[in-house]
Amino acid sequence: MLAYLIRRILYALPILLGVNLLTFALFFVVNTPDDMARMQLGIKRVTPEAIAKWKQQHGYDKPLLYNDVAAGAGKLTDTIFVQKSASMFVGEFGFSDDGRSIGREIQTRMMPSLAIALPTFVIGLLLYITFALVLTLFRATALDTAGVALCVLLMSVSSLFYIIGGQFLVSKLWHWAPISGYAPGMDGLRFLVLPVLIGVVGGIGSSGRWYRTIFLEEIGKDYVRTARAKGLSELRVLFRHVLKNAMIPILTGVVVVIPLLFMGSLLTESFFGIPGLGSYTIEAIQAQDFSVVRAMVFLGSVMYIVGLILTDLSYTLVDPRVRLQ
Amino acid sequence: MMPVMLWTDALVFLLLACGAAGAWYVRRQPHLLLPWQRVAQSRIGMVSLLVLSLFLLVGLLDSLHYRVALPERNAGQTVYSPEVLSAFDALAGNLRTHTEKTYSSPLATQLYARETVELPDGATQRAYPRLKFGGAHLANPDTEWMGDVASRAALGGLEGALAGGLLIAFLGWAKRDVSTRESRRALFWSTLLLAALIGATASLASGYHVLGTDKVGQDVLYLSLKSIRTGLVIGTVTTLVMLPFALFLGVAAGYFRGWVDDAIQYLYTVLSSIPSVLLIAAAVLMMQVVIEQHADWFATAAERADVRLLCLCLILGVTSWTGLCRLLRGETLKLRELEYIQAAQAFGVSSLRILTRHIVPNVMHIVLISVVMDFSALVLAEAVLSYVGVGVDPSTISFGTMINAARLELGREPVVWWMLAAAFGFMLVLVLAANLFADAVRDAFDPRLNRMA
């Protein structure tokens, strides 16, 4: 198990290196630091001195890959690639354009993101699976058809509509919850109601249908017929046999997103004014703060790879046949 | 008049030609025609296809661009207006040119906000001013409005239904084919209904702003119809970009295995490990810098917006091929072990020929299903990306830019709801039709659901 884990982590390194090289190419080769400086200072009438000063302030006044001037190992390390890009491997995210430490921002903004994303995830998962189980129980009846039709309809609605419509109905017309804002601790619970509700409702369509497909696939198998032949009730068959056997495809889709919950949701957080990582990212995109976007891209892929490893580990929990070696 | 061929226009028509060629080829191959006949038997599939083709028609008309010659000549040379119009603009006519001062609600005869107006006797009064075009033909809107709207809608609906009926008669719908009788009946009624709806809207639009006007007085119906092209371009051109990557790399990885497989797997793991919105955002930010630094590349604002739209499609395509590629690799791994492939190998058929003749045709159903399913996701993604600020050019009319403009006005009292409603409504119809059609296609092509034919 431990050996497997270590090997997986070692496998992850070349992938992260690839991500790092890709973002490096995108942010420094397609656009040189000079372009960035011009962008930040305003395109027109920028003096070369102003560009040089901006680059020096933000640490971009170095060669990209190989430094002739430096001595010894500095030839390779005193470059933009090592200082700005590769340093993310050891958790050095550097500073945003307004001079704040990105690493510190990530730490403080993680909690608000989790406060929204975790309840949405847990409530959503339980609700979707229950919904799909009910549809499976009543398969090939009018209820099932209506449920699937509802799913397709809900799937076709833009996620922006859920947020805008939800804010309008729940907060503006009915005054059930504050329209946006955030406060830490129990005090902030009332702020969480609306975003979590909208997040859960927004996912019913696609997730409900997806789980239904998984359950329907299981229910046609031989062991289900055996269970029925033993005289088990349909509910018992569903919960004790079908649900357990459907765990592998469910976990495949679900576990991988758990680490990504830290990153928050771009749309929800920006609409509800939640100071999480999602709104941090969106603000950085809108302010064209490349160092923050770069850091978030790297963090996101680390989280995704952690999710893949967790998925493999979770298989051993639900299926005794799976052995990791 | 000078025809203008924008990049995306060219690609849209290229796609259309590919589609037509594909349809012509499939018609002559009975085994390929079979699943499509199953689609033709599906009522929901055919009705959604009808709706989709209406959207497609609007989008295609909106892709025929031209620039009008200005009346004044410059040293014998014809001068063209910098504004790029399309065949759709010419057809829409008044919809585009009849702009009011600011917001007005659907079918209104007055502006949405009170203004100080001067009365004939010189005094001033705070009142709702009449619109310049909406309901301008009414002498006394308070009493005549209801009757006029009702009669226009009824007459227009009737005319539309008649035209629809004639069209059906002309196309000879009553073909005697038992298997598609149900779907033809559904198609018949939905054509009549849609024709009546279009007729009523057109007749109302000649005197009113059917869906109201926006902040600068543009007709919202016109904006919504123009948005369709942007959605269609993103949904289709992205596919065109994505397919070569997914098909070529996926099939190659599955067939050759070994280091080719390792390399391709590494490539798509790297790409798919970056959260897609972030990767798209990063790429679009970079593209913005390039475009802004080279403003001299583009003759008109429309061309710049068009290149941006094309780049967005490229970026979406390059970042979204990984899912399909993985599917195709898995399917090819399965296919290459089958007897007919091994027989081909034993006969000494070259790898290239095995791939093109034996593997690719047998994974095409996966490609087709995933392309149709991706379409709706891409239309929805456009709105989100435009909201985030990494979508289309702000001057391009799209569902995303419409929603963005309207979102800020929800705080007003009374609420300006019609822009949001129009954008979301049109998007819902387009995406729902695409989803339903995708389901019909999947049911018809999925070999696991294969029934005896």
Image: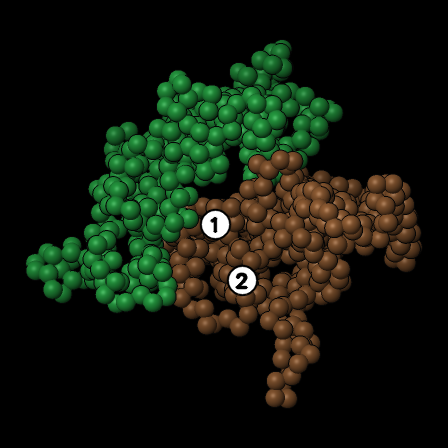
Q: Which chain is green?
A: A
- Residue furthest left in the image: A72
Q: Nearer the viewer, residue A96 or A196?
A: A96
Measured as percent of width and height from the top left, residue B410 is found at 59, 38
Q: Are marks 1 and 2 on the same chain?
A: yes
- A2 lies left or right of B319: left
Q: Residue at x 76, y 60 (%)?
A: B94
- A106 lies left or right of A87: right
Measured as percent of width and height from the top left, residue B113 is found at 67, 43
Q: Is residue A150 above or below residue B437?
A: above
Real-space Cα separation, disc 1 to disc 2, in angstroms: 14 Å
Measured as percent of width and height from the top left, residue A313 is found at 36, 29
Q: Which residue is mark 1?
A: B389
**In the figure, residue B415 lies in which quadrant?**
top right
The amino acid on which the numbered mark 1 sits, given as a three-letter code, is Gly
Q: Colour of chain B?
A: brown
Whether residue B242 can be seen here = no
Measured as percent of width and height from the top left, residue B185 is found at 86, 43
Q: Which residue is mark 2?
A: B305
Q: Residue at x 63, y 76 (%)?
A: B80
Element under disc 1 = loop
Q: Nearer the viewer, residue A134 or A127?
A: A127
Q: Quadrant of the C terminus of chain B?
A: top right
Q: Nearer the viewer, residue A52 or A314?
A: A52
The chain identifier of the residue carrying mark 2 reads B
Element under disc 2 = helix
The amino acid on which the numbered mark 2 sits, given as a three-letter code, is Ala
Q: Residue at x 31, y 65 (%)?
A: A46
